[in-house]
Amino acid sequence: MKANQLNISSQSKTNRLIQNAYKQRYLLMMVIPGVIFMLVFNFYPIYFAQIAFKDYNITMGTNLSLAPWLGFTHIIEFFKSPDFANVMADTLGISFYKLLIGFPIPIVFAILLNEIAQTRFKKAVQTITYLPHFLSWIILGGILLIWMSDSGLITNTLYHLHLISSPANMLANAKYFWPISVASEVWKEFGWNSIIYLAAIATIDMEMFEAARIDGAGKFRQIWNITLPSIAPTIVLMLILAISGLFSSNFDQIFVLRNAVNASASNVIGIYVYQQSFMYNRFDYATAVGLFQSLVAAILLISANATSGWLTGNSIF
């Protein structure tokens, strides 16, 4: 009797599911292109991750069964490589400073922008700061190459401010590469990254600010006691995602700005994988390094999420 009731219940659920799907068939059809895109570019490549554990040659094509199994040989080779220390230092160094400097700036900018009363001026500032995000690193890289040349705008400005000793090409000096990469990344993205914080601030009940003003709280006190606590969950969420990207780097930016002179300071893991793949045709080794990078990023994401949940009670999952 109970088995019959369970069968009837499951059939009714299936029928309701089919009916709901039919009612929403046009919406589901709109999802199909996105699903196909994810299957082709996100899930199908997972099959080829096994190249990391095989002795693969490009002549084998997609027939991976021809490649003999090597296990963790490529990963161990990467750990023992003389480039390992330099790659890790450049990757983690650049990413850490981008996080340390680039993460709080959009938050501060969003708070300051929210305090602007003049709507036209506020929109103008938003437009100016958002604009670099929509330009590719090919364009921005070309601009920076000109600005930082021997007679470039930034080079001459820093020289006259006595911040550099001579008006020489800054990208031809390895010691300037990290500051340039961090500063240019912040300049390009801080306006765009502030949007999510502005959206979070917009959800705050304005009566809280009115009550604070009545109690005599100034702007700084309102920001410290109302604005920041209210957007704290958003800040934590973005921080978790930012920490998960510590082991990655902006490949487009580094690829455009690097050269033979600053190579020692710009040999991040993305560049290393690119070189091993297309310069030395070591696709198996490059896949292993890329898989190691993805694994560490996943560990960082899970660890940051768990730590955030333990300390603040806010987490992604």
Image (tube, grey):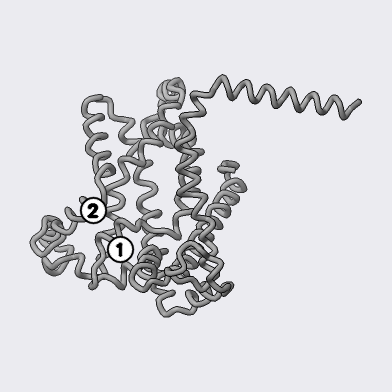
Residue labelled with disc 2: 138
Residue occupied by mark 1 = 178
Residue placed most toward the observer, 4 or 123? 4
Q: Is residue 59 above or below residue 316?
A: below
From this viewpoint, is residue 296 visible? Answer: no
Picture quarter containing residue 57? bottom left
- In this rendering, position of residue 211 left or right of residue 184: right
Gap in Å between the C-alphas at discs 2 and 1? 18 Å
Q: Quadrant of the C terminus?
A: top right
Q: Which residue occupies 30% across, 52% down?
A: 185
Q: Is residue 16 above or below residue 35?
A: above
Residue extending furthest toward the right? 1
Q: Nearer the viewer, residue 194 or 299?
A: 299
Mark 2, residues whose alpha carbon is within 10 Å: few (<14), some, or many (≥20)? some
Badge nearest the viewer, 2 or 1? 2
- Nearest to the observer: residue 287 or residue 251: 287
Q: Position of residue 78 (x, y in %)?
A: 47, 74
Which image quadrant: the N terminus?
A: top right
Does residue 285 sit above or below 3 in this rendering?
below
Residue at 33% across / 71% down in the picture?
Answer: 279
Residue 288 visible in the displayed image: yes
From the top left corner, tell me how far across and down residue 238 is, in percent: 46, 44
| Amino acid type, residue under disc 1 in the picture | Trp
